[in-house]
């Protein structure tokens, strides 16, 4: 019963309550027995996710980048600047870009 509940996505604390035991007792006696079921579900779900990523499904790629690669919807300005410089540095005249950025800041300051 517990293994099927885990595979169905029921939280383990809920399963412990369903079995009429404390979560500590559940962790000690039941959880070790159902670890293979938990691992199996994780493996299956990761497989589906990777299949979707291979199919270039955008939301799956976005999910993976955010959860596994530390991406965010919006990065702080200093991280954006680091990312841009890190990617484009070999091809950019950074001095020219820095001068342009200073001119733009000066224009904004005048307004």
Image: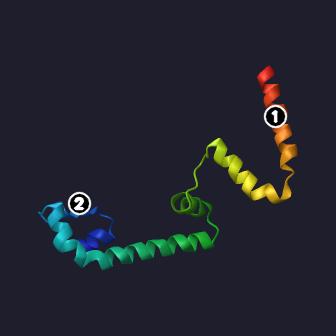
Up-down: is 13 above or below 7? above
Secondary structure under badge 2?
helix
| Residue 1, visible in the rendered structure | no
Q: Position of residue 67 (x, y in %)?
A: 51, 59
Image height check: is 92 above or below 21? above
Residue 41 visible to the viewer: yes
Q: Position of residue 99 (x, y in %)?
A: 85, 39
For image coordinates 21% across by 68% down, the residue present is: 27
Residue 7 lies in what quarter of the image?
Answer: bottom left
User: What crowding class fits label 1: few (fewer than 14 Cα within 10 Å), some (14-19), or many (20 or more)?
Assistant: few
User: Which numbered disc covers residue 57?
Assistant: none
| Number of marks drawn | 2
Instruction: Identify the disc placed on residue 13.
Output: 2
Point out residue 102 in the picture as x, y percentages from the top left corner: 81, 34
Mark 2 touches mark 1? (CB < 8 Å): no
> The C terminus is located in which quarter?
top right
Foreground disc of the pair 2, 1: 1
Asked if 78 appears above or below 59 in the picture, the reply is above
Residue 108, quarter of picture: top right
In-front residue for pair 27/41? 27
Residue tagged by mark 1? 102
Residue 11's image quarter? bottom left
Q: In the figure, 50 relative to 62: above or below?
A: below
Q: Position of residue 85 (x, y in %)?
A: 75, 52
Report the front residue among 89 and 60. 89
Q: Residue at x 55, y 73 (%)?
A: 50
Q: Earlier in the sequence, mark 2 or mark 1?
A: 2
């Amino acid at each position: 019963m517990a293994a099927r509940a885990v595979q169905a996505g029921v939280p383990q604390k809920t399963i412990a309550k369903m079995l009429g035991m404390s979560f500590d007792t559940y962790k000690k006696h039941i959880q070790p027995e159902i670890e293979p079921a938990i691992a199996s579900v994780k493996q299956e779900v990761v497989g589906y996710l990777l299949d979707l990523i291979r199919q270039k499904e955008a939301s799956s790629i976005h999910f993976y980048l955010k959860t596994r690669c530390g991406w965010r919807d919006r990065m702080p300005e200093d991280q954006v600047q680091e990312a841009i410089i890190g990617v484009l540095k070999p091809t950019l005249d950074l001095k020219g870009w820095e001068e342009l950025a200073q001119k733009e800041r000066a224009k904004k300051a005048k307004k």
